[in-house]
Image (cartoon, helix red, strand yellow):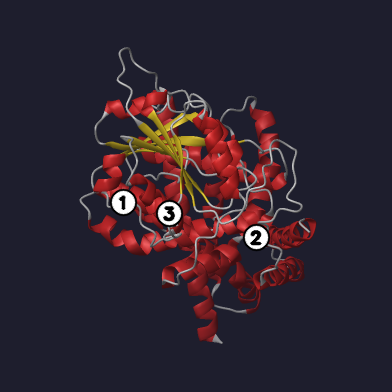
Amino acid sequence: MYWLELTIIILYTAALSFIFVYSLSQLNLVLIYRKAQRKKTIAKPATVPENYDYPVVTVQLPVYNELYVVERLIDAVARLEWPKDKLEIQVLDDSNDETVDLIAQTVEKWKKEGIDITQVRRPERKGFKAGALQYGMKVAKGEFIAIFDADFVPEPDFLIHSVPHFEKDKKIGVVQTRWGHINEKYSMLTKLQAFGLNTHFFVEQNGRSQGGHFLNFNGTGGIWRKTCIEDAGGWKADTLTEDLDLSYRAQLKGWQIFYNPDTVAPAELPAAMSAIKSQQYRWTKGAAETSIKLLPKVLKAPLSLGTKFHATFHLLNSAVFICIVLTAFLSIPILFIRNLSDGWQTIMDISMMFLLGYVFLVIFYWNGFREKREGFWKTVKDFVPQMFMLLSVFLGLSLHNAVAVFEGLIGKKTPFVRTPKFNITGKKGSWKGNIYFKKKINPLTILEGFLGLYFTGGLALAFYFNDFALLPFHLLLSLGFLLVFYYTLQHTRHAS
């Protein structure tokens, strides 16, 4: 029993320690961001200078079976404000359904308006999105390449406010903009996703940029210098996050990513739990794959200790989900050890201190939430319930994401699973009858339901032992897993 208890305590403390140090890295980004705000060094949208020599820009639209949103995407891109003779649009179409014909019709419509637009069809869908981007780049005319995924609806002035930034430094290889959300108010889930993404774009990306640390192209809503892509080795399909992979390879080559936060690229958020899960799976597994591939190179590179520190936790951020699952699952045995075993009290007290990591994460998200909001107390009133729900759902998705991370770390290869789009704007729309919606329940969903009950038992144990130290944690866990379980079943039933 001694060795079992010791093993549980070591694993629990080690996982909490990783979360704690990761949270410190996020807290440091908050401090960098706030300092940049005070000094007013955060970038503003570009303006076109007098006698500006407009470069040729190629806009790439990688799509695969996007029947519901592809026409909206093409129409928005065709309206971009840029000289027609300096703008090329490539619809990189890997579709194998009715989307092919819809794209052909929409492309023909804009060709008649004088737009240089092409439907690019390759012989086979090799390499998924990375393969499509690489295929299109070989024939692209542009000096710069803008990329939009199918769920984006860029504003007409997007290029005007972004491309001129490249003039500031020939080593700028990427200009990344901030994502907006056209359906943020659709449901609680879309509000929570917007909350999390806004914090990433307001705090994390700004913090890395202002601190001179590595940051990432977010896969869409940004522009690459073509020579940068070529110098970094081109798009690769050996990870599920080709954007993170190329970003780091480019920065290791000395290229810079310029973050342009006040230029916004609006997009549609996944509204159904299964769509959120597929997106989270790709992001978390791809990050783990990229960390295995590139972290050794980052640690060997001639970079500052601060940049190596932040790059390490940037690449390993998805590993947080494995640590969350470990601390969550072991927290019930920890309750028994705390209350039924002697000799561990000092170690228990020390390990509990690392729960402060969750407090640091709350501070991190507060700084993202308060942006663009007025009135302190109203912001607090809105923040508290949304932060509670965000943490709950974040924890509820931890098992699903931990499995994805584990697969990425051990090198298990899986196909690029696209996130289904529903063409939902504002509070209107539905995915009922959507032909891309997966109507099968993953066995992992059943386990999520059982875990919800498992952590509900933890709540009962808190009152049994009169030990409430872990009660808030178990409350968030039980609610989170039950919510994820419920929404997965409910949304799947609603799709039929």
Sooner in the amino-acid sequence: mark 1 or mark 2: 1
Residue situated in front as seen by the camera: 442 or 121: 121
Q: Nearer the viewer, mark 3 or mark 1?
A: 3
**In this view of the protein, can residue 427 be seen by the observer?**
yes
Between marks 3 and 1, how big is the CA–CA gap?
17 Å
Amino acid marked by disc 1: Gly
Between marks 1 and 2, how big is the CA–CA gap?
36 Å
Q: Nearer the viewer, mark 2 or mark 3?
A: 3
Q: Which residue is mark 1?
A: 234
Quadrant location of the C terminus?
bottom right
Q: Classify 304 as above or below 206.
A: below
Element under label 3?
loop
Quarter location, residue 398:
bottom right
Residue situated in front as seen by the camera: 5 or 294: 294
Residue situated in front as seen by the camera: 246 or 159: 159
Pinpoint residue 229: horizontal percent, then vertical percent. Answer: 30, 45
Q: Which residue is mark 3?
A: 122
Q: Assess disc 3: are there few (<14), some (14-19) or many (≥20) residues with their C-alpha within 10 Å of its C-alpha.
A: some
